[in-house]
Image: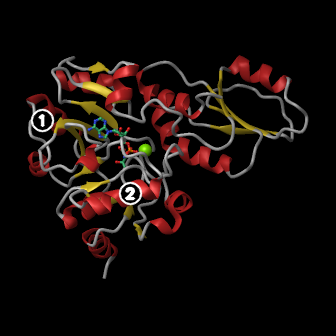
């Protein structure tokens, strides 16, 4: 039996399958099977009030899940699906409460990764898939990372190599008058505005916390103490380091850091897309080294870096 057929069989029996998407790896279960969905929460140690995204293969399936599909959502779907965009719709009454955290809305995404699409197409129904990591950890962007996060808790992991986007999808709430970005992603505000003729807003901090729970806690965080510092702050921080501390600095600029055997320099890409693609992988590799700290050079202002800034802020929150 090939791996897709095996994955479909596992999903059909209420089991869990991890699979690649273009953003990050997801932990999949049959979205119509409450017991299966419950296993997703258990495997991730995720609180039940954090709703899951339902993944579909085709636009025609949308109305099985969404009870209202506004024209603007169809425009966004035409522009960005399959792809790294999740839209939040008013839900059909048949959508399980355990999927939506009891909310009257449901998050839907059609991913573009060929393996994800092949799986969704072969399964035929909706598949819930949160990122395949432990709650609050860094999302996995390769198979090794999924194994680290979930071990025996997942029956099968489909291997699609490294994820091309590397950060979670942009989430846009289209259930109210004006489309509202609840979570920034590599599909930016500008890209959305271009499609909607400028009709889009960004959720306030409070709004996104209530409507996309999990958006503003310490999230996407390495275990190692991780700091977000300007270039100047990095230099002053290095000058007062205790002399038994091994640290790593992640820089994307040409910042010159004093050479030292305890100070390791990781050169990050200067372009946002390439930076995003490698960010979680880099953090995860550094996390294995038991460093005293990771210092990340603050990234540029500007729309292309918004999602990266968001994840870096969360990875370094409360520290
Ligand atoms: O890129 C992605 O979106 C990945 C891949 C696997 O598709 N999935 C992902 O899922 O990041 P997860 O569960 O880690 O994050 C989903 C986010 C959560 O913050 C959740 O609160 C929000 O989506 N969400 C899901 N359904 C929602 C709803 N009905 N209303 C508001 N927010 C929702
Ligand atoms: Mg997640």
Of 288 and 96, nearer the camera is 96
Instruction: Name the residue: 38% across, 21% down.
Output: 206
Residue 196 in percent (x, y) is at 18, 23
Residue neighbourhood size for the residue with mark 2, other residues' Cα within 10 Å, grouped as few (<14), some (14–19), many (≥20): many
* Left or right of residue 56: residue 115: right
Residue neighbourhood size for the residue with mark 1, other residues' Cα within 10 Å, grouped as few (<14), some (14–19), many (≥20): few
Of 197 and 109, nearer the camera is 109
* Left or right of residue 171: residue 47: right
C-alpha distance separating marks 1 and 2: 30 Å
Q: Secondary structure at mark 1?
A: helix
Residue topped by disc 1: 74
Residue 75 in percent (x, y) is at 14, 32
The answer to whether the beta carbon of the residue marked 2 is less than 8 Å from any atom of ligand 1 is: no
The answer to whether the beta carbon of the residue marked 1 is less than 8 Å from any atom of ligand 1 is: no
Instruction: Name the residue: 15% across, 33% down.
Output: 73
- Ligand 2 sits in quadrant: top left
Taking 313 as reference, is 146 above or below it? below
Asked which quadrant contains residue 107, the reply is top left
Residue 251 in percent (x, y) is at 65, 31
Q: Earlier in the sequence, mark 1 or mark 2?
A: 2
* Left or right of residue 244: residue 126: left
Residue 82 in percent (x, y) is at 24, 47
Instruction: Name the residue: 72% across, 17% down.
Output: 232
Of 166 and 171, nearer the camera is 171
Residue topped by disc 2: 40
Where is the C terminus found, in terms of image quarters? top right
From where the camera sits, is residue 278 visible? yes
């Amino acid at each position: 039996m090939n791996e897709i057929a095996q994955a479909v069989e596992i999903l059909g029996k209420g089991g869990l399958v991890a699979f690649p998407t273009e953003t990050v790896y997801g932990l999949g279960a049959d979205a119509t099977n409450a017991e299966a969905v419950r296993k997703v929460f258990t495997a991730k140690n995720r609180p039940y009030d954090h709703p899951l995204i339902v993944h579909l293969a085709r636009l025609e399936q949308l109305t099985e899940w969404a009870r209202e599909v506004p024209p603007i959502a169809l425009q966004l779907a035409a522009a960005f699906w399959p792809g790294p965009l999740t839209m939040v719709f008013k839900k059909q009454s048949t959508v399980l409460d355990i999927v939506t955290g009891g909310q009257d809305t449901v998050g839907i995404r059609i991913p573009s990764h060929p393996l994800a699409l092949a799986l969704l197409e072969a399964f035929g129904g909706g598949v819930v898939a949160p990122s395949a990591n432990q709650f609050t950890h860094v999302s996995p962007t390769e198979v090794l990372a999924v194994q680290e996060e979930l071990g025996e808790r997942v029956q099968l992991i489909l291997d699609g190599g490294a994820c091309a986007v590397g950060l979670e999808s942009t989430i846009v709430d289209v259930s109210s008058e004006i489309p509202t970005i609840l979570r920034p992603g590599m599909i930016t505000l500008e890209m959305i505005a271009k499609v909607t003729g400028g009709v889009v807003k960004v959720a306030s901090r409070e709004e996104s916390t209530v409507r996309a729970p999990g958006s503003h806690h310490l999230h996407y965080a390495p275990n190692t103490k991780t700091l977000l510092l300007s270039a100047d702050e990095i230099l002053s921080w290095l000058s007062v380091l205790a002399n038994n501390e091994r640290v790593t600095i992640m820089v994307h600029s040409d910042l010159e850091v004093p050479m030292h055997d305890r100070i390791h320099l990781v050169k990050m890409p200067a372009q946002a897309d390439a930076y995003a693609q490698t960010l979680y992988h880099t953090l995860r590799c550094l996390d294995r080294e038991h460093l005293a700290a990771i210092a990340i050079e603050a990234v540029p202002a500007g729309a292309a870096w918004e999602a990266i800034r968001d994840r870096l802020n969360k990875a370094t929150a409360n520290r």
